[in-house]
Image (tube, rainbow, N blue to C red):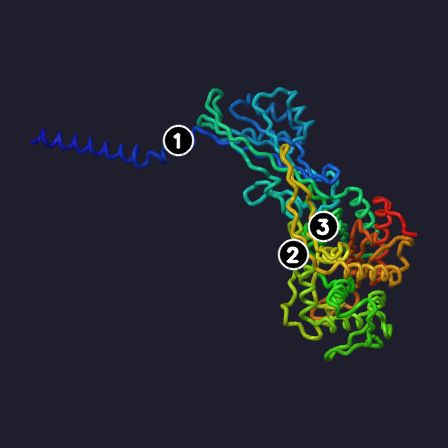
Amino acid sequence: MRLRFVIGIFILIFLGLVARLFYWQVIKGGTLSKQAELQYNGSTKIISPRGSIYASDNTWLAIQKANWLLFAEKPNLENPRIVADSISSIIEEENNDIYALLTKPEIVWIPIKHKITGEQKRQVEELNIKGLGFELEETRFYPEGSVSAQLLGFVGKNNEGVDTGYFGLEGYYDISLKGKSGFIEREKDLKGVPFISGSMSEISSVSGANLITHIDKRITSIVDSKLKEAIEKYGAKEGSVIVMNPKNGAILAMSSYPSYDPAKYNEYDGNLYKNPAISDTFEPGSVFKVLVMAAGLDDGAVSPDTICDICSGPLKVDKYFIETWNRKYYPDSTMTDVIVHSDNVGMSFVAQKLGADKLYDYLDKFGIGKLTGIDLQGESNIPMRKRGTWNIVDLATASFGQGISTTPIQIIRAVSAVANDGVLVTPKVVEKIELEGWSQNVDKKEEIRVIKKDTAEKMTEIMVQAAGHGEAQWTNLKGFSVAGKTGTAQIPIAGHYDPDATIASFIGFAPSNNPKFVMLVTLKEPQSSQWASETAAPLWYSIAKDLFAYFGIQPDN
């Protein structure tokens, strides 16, 4: 009996051992195998180089700048105190702080300092200190500093610590620019030090693509310097300028002020990151009259010579009175006169002839209240009120650019249709994307005919008359054919308009018969004068004068 009992005990122990072996080797085998693999195999991420951004002349707007991370492999360090004393002056850190890092327990691989320069790296390497090493870590560099910062955007860390593009081109094209990371797997010991003769496998990284833009650095330089001068001269809070090719939508320059340095973005107010040219919504004021008049002409509701029979005084609409900006009235004005005088009553006349639904349809085709599709991160818009909901007051005020919200990029795109024989194009910054010998032009968006070519020609001539004989005629460049229109927009606050603050703008293109550029200037709350004719218009012509020389545009007479 005793023998059987002992044998039974041994059998139970044996079965228990078999069960435990089965559990660890079969049931938990896969998990343990993975844990062992992780313990003895280290994976290192290979960050792909971020692509560069180039101007139209193939010079840099944004590039990667080589910096290094200085690190120490603790098992290979011979004397941490000597190491700390030797490198402290080179890397500009306290030797005691370095020593504290090098002697931290339980740490094998020690990052000492990021953003080591090439010269600092050379000096440390000359010391031939065993156990120190460098790891390349590129940082974003913007050769032009704050110029076109809102257009370019910046590169920062996301929640996972990965370089990510934000705003502008950096944000919009982030996936293309960042490429695809790779990995290196190596065998290592329990302390995390790779075996010299251990196995290694590598998945190569794929470099980020380069962007070739339409941005012209010479035009940008002109725009940027003159915009800063104008803001100081007129005491404006901020301003923006867009220069575009009306025939294909290419953005030649886009500048805003105040600006920031994208390489040091975290040192600036975050409100400066957004691009006012694409994100600021405002009631456009009289520049909007170009679109409403073009709609009336295209529909046949009016012609350039149609007489306004209600332009002799203020116009009563419901319980409100529509007045002209300067309280001057011009009986029997033609439609050309209405634009030349920037007559709100005359524009209400056009809107009444056209009707709310037709005006809505034309503005919708012009892209008002819609995203333009420009290839920049951060574009915003406020949709128009729904078709069929406009009352007679809405119709009247919309005719001269009140009660309706747009962005600068929407306005320049819409007016470009007049300059482009009635065809609307999509604004775009990037011309093509390149990667290691491969090149692809950015997809051309659908072009939309908004008004007839004949209408565009009539509207252009009216704008030429407005530029030459309107309230800003004193700023006009004599001998050059410019089609333009001023706009002085009131700023809505708490259910009414601020009596002391305006947004001054000027939209124009030249030469009027074969435009090389269309340009929109916007100044927010100028203090020297609230009128665009005395602020935005002089700035527009100051820039245009240099653009005429740059493009080789000769005077007509």
Q: Position of residue 502 (x, y in %)?
A: 78, 63
Q: Earlier in the sequence, mark 2 or mark 3?
A: 3
The image's mark for residue 249 is 3
Residue kind at label 1, given as amino acid type: Ala
Number of marks drawn: 3
Name the foreground residue: 11 vs 78. Answer: 11
Q: CA distance from mark 2 to mark 1?
A: 54 Å
* Crowd around label 2: few <14 · some 14–19 · many ≥20 (10 Å): some
Q: Position of residue 262 (x, y in %)?
A: 69, 44
Name the foreground residue: 485 vs 461. Answer: 461
Residue for point 32% across, 36% down: 28
Q: Position of residue 458 (x, y in %)?
A: 80, 61
Q: Which quarter shows the N terminus?
A: top left
Q: Which residue is mark 1?
A: 36
Residue kind at label 2, given as amino acid type: Leu
Residue for point 63% across, 69% down: 387
Q: Earlier in the sequence, mark 2 or mark 1?
A: 1
Name the side, left or right, on which 118 lies relative to 45.
Answer: right
Q: Earlier in the sequence, mark 3 or mark 1?
A: 1
Q: Position of residue 315 (x, y in %)?
A: 79, 77
Q: Which residue is mark 2?
A: 371
- For label 2, the SS is loop
Residue for point 77% across, 77% down: 321
